[in-house]
Each structure stands twice: as structure tokens, then as C-alpha cells.
Image: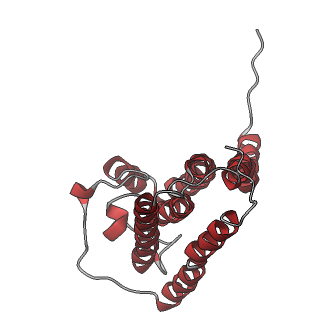
Amino acid sequence: MSSISLTSGEVAGQRRFAERGRAVIGIAILAPFAVAGLFHTPLGESQPWLKLALDALGWAFFVAGTGLRLWATLYIGGHKGKELVSEGPYSLCRNPLYLGIFLLVLSIAFFLGSPLLAIGLGLALLVYLRATVASEERRLQARQGAVFDEYCARVPRFWPRFDGFRAGEKLEIDLRTLWLEARRALRWCAIPLACELVRLVESLPGWPRLF
């Protein structure tokens, strides 16, 4: 029986390919769910109370995701790539910025009342974030070594654990980084507006409902 071994360069090349292709793969996963969602009757269309509940959940996810990203930026701004940040939101989970994106994107499914879209978004995000986070953590481990290993043992990668929260004695804020994230947050505001436009189009007479 023969065996095949990869050189470190080949392994690194495969990792870079996975990183470059993560967006394309994510879109390919999401596309059929998004298309199906357009022709699926939204939850709450004939039940105003359910639509109100879904809208409330959408806003809760949207505000939580935006707030978490801004909070994380206060701590990581100016330090990313230079030192390990392990306080504030980074004491709850190792990737609060990406958790914020996860919450923001899932708010779309609630705004649109689409369980199909929720499944597609969840799968696409898992693929995208798995490749991105794994790559970033490999680089951090290479730079920080045992310090990063201890941090990983103490703080979960994605889902927060609140019993380990650390606020820190002081917080140095990088205003430039905070301003950049604030500008991104303004773009996120297009999410509820775009979702409302989609629901308006779907409510037009004659819009096809396949199921």
C-alpha cells in the first residue's frame, strides 16, 4: 500500500485555496435556499402577530450583532495582529466580530420570515467562518505560541461563555478603527430596509407562490 504525503508548501497552498474560495462556496450553498425562499410563503403573512414576533426577533439579532461588533472594535482596534486581546468581548469568545456578523446575517431570515433562508444562511456562514477563523487562529498560534494555546483552552471559539468575563483595568480606544466600524454599521442599516423591500415585492398581486 502506498501513501501520499504533502509538503508544508502544498498544505499551505490548499489552505490558501480554501480561504480564497470560501466566499464562492458560501454563495453556492446559499443560492438555492435564497431562490426557494423568494417563492415560499413567508411565515406570518396571514398572521400579523407572528410577523410582529419575527420582526422583533430580527431587530433583536440586528441590534445585538451591530452592538457586539462595535463593542469588539473598542477592544481590538489598533491591536489586531500586534498583540493578543483577551478582555471585554474577547473574554467571552475568541471571535466576537464574526459572531456579530453571524447575528446580523441571521436577522435577515427573521425579517423575511423565511426558514429556508435561515437554513441556507446558517450553512453558508458556517462554511465561510470555519475557513476564515481557522486561518486567523493558525496565524495567531504561530505568533503567540503558548499564550494563545492557554487562551484557547480558557475561552470558546465562537459561542460565548459568560463566567470567564474580564473587563480589564483600562481601555485604549483607536478612534480611526472605531470610525471605520461605525461606517460599516451604517451600511448594515440597509439590511432591514432591503428586507422590507423584498417583502413588499413578494406581496404584489400575481407574485408566484410555489409552496
Residue drawn where x is 35% and y is 67% of the image? 89
Q: How is the image coloured?
A: secondary structure
* The furthest residue to the top: 1
Residue 51 vs 27, above or below: the answer is below
Q: Quadrant of residue 57?
A: bottom left
Is 7 displayed left or right of 160 in the figure? right
Residue shown at the point (72%, 45%) measured from the top left? 210
Up the image or down, 190 lies above or below 14; here it is: below
Horizontal relation, residue 37 to residue 97: left or right: right
Q: Position of residue 142 (x, y in %)?
A: 54, 54
Which of the pair 41/59 is nearer the observer? 41
Nearer to the camera, 127 or 112: 112
Residue at image coords 49%, 81%: 78
Tell me what residue is drawn at x 50 percent, y 53 percent: 141
Residue 124 in picture, x, y percent from top left: 63, 50
Query: Where, by quadrant of the figure, is residue 52 drawn?
Result: bottom left
Percent from the top left, x then y, of residue 171?
32, 82
Q: Nearer the viewer, residue 8 or 105?
A: 105
Picture coordinates of residue 154, whole percent (x, y): 31, 50
Instruction: Report the number of numbered marks.
Output: 0
Work out whether residue 1 can be spotted. Answer: yes
Answer whether residue 16 is visible to the viewer in this image: no
Quadrant of the frame with the N terminus: top right
| Quadrant occupied by the C terminus | top right
Q: Nearer the viewer, residue 72 or 173?
A: 72
Vertical relation: 1 (above or below) 131: above
